[in-house]
Amino acid sequence: MPRFALALDLVDDPAKIAEYEKYHEKIPAEIDASIREAGITNMEIYRLGNRLFMIMETTDEFSFDAKAAADAANPHVQAWEKLMWGYQQALPMAKPGEKWLLMDQIFKL
């Protein structure tokens, strides 16, 4: 089962970070469904300061391109992403329009 690690920053504001975490205590059902329908079988997000780290486990058929296309066509996901972008900020090395960046695995035990 494929596993991916991604990173993103939050706006460095304790109040905004607390709000962001509150939203993730129970995400909307439509967002949960869009994640699962894309072939993501497990997703975890960790935070250190304002840096986020996401681990995704997916089916073999999962595609980032297919997920992006489905998200673009889903008004619930678009509304969620717009709301979340008020709390998030791109990593310094991100290209324009990039959000979560895929990390390279450099070690495995």
Image (cartoon, grey):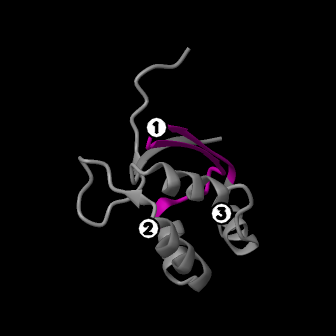
Does the magenta portion include 42? yes
The residue segment tinted magenta is 41-65
41, 7: nearer the viewer:
7
Q: Position of residue 59 (x, y in %)?
A: 66, 51
Q: Is residue 55 above or below residue 36?
A: above
Q: Is residue 93 visible?
A: yes
Residue occupying image coordinates x 57% and y 85% = 75
Query: In 3D space, how far apart are the residues under numbered discs 3 and 2 (Cα atoms)?
Result: 20 Å
At x 62% / y 50%, what residue is drawn? 60
Few, some or many residues within 10 Å of mark 3 (<14, 14–19, 20+):
some
Q: Residues within 10 Å of mark 2 (few under 14, many from 20)?
A: few
Can you identify the residue that label 3 sits on? 35
Residue in the image at 48% along x and 60% along y: 64
Residue 46 is a magenta residue: yes
Q: Nearer the viewer, mark 3 or mark 2?
A: 2
The location of residue 69, given as percent across then percent down, is 48, 75
Q: Amino acid at mark 2?
A: Gly
> Label 1, on which residue?
49
The secondary element bearing badge 2 is classed as loop
Neighbours of disc 1 within 10 Å: few (<14), some (14-19), many (20+): few
Asked if 1 appears above or below 66 in the picture, the reply is above
Q: Is residue 31 above or below residue 4?
A: below
Q: Quadrant of residue 103?
A: top left
First in sequence: mark 1 vs mark 2: 1
What's under tag 3, amino acid-wise? Answer: Ile
Residue 61 figure quarter: bottom right
Which of the two discs, 3 and 2, labels the residue nearer the N terminus? 3
Mark 2, residue position: 86
Q: Is residue 80 left or right of residue 35?
A: left
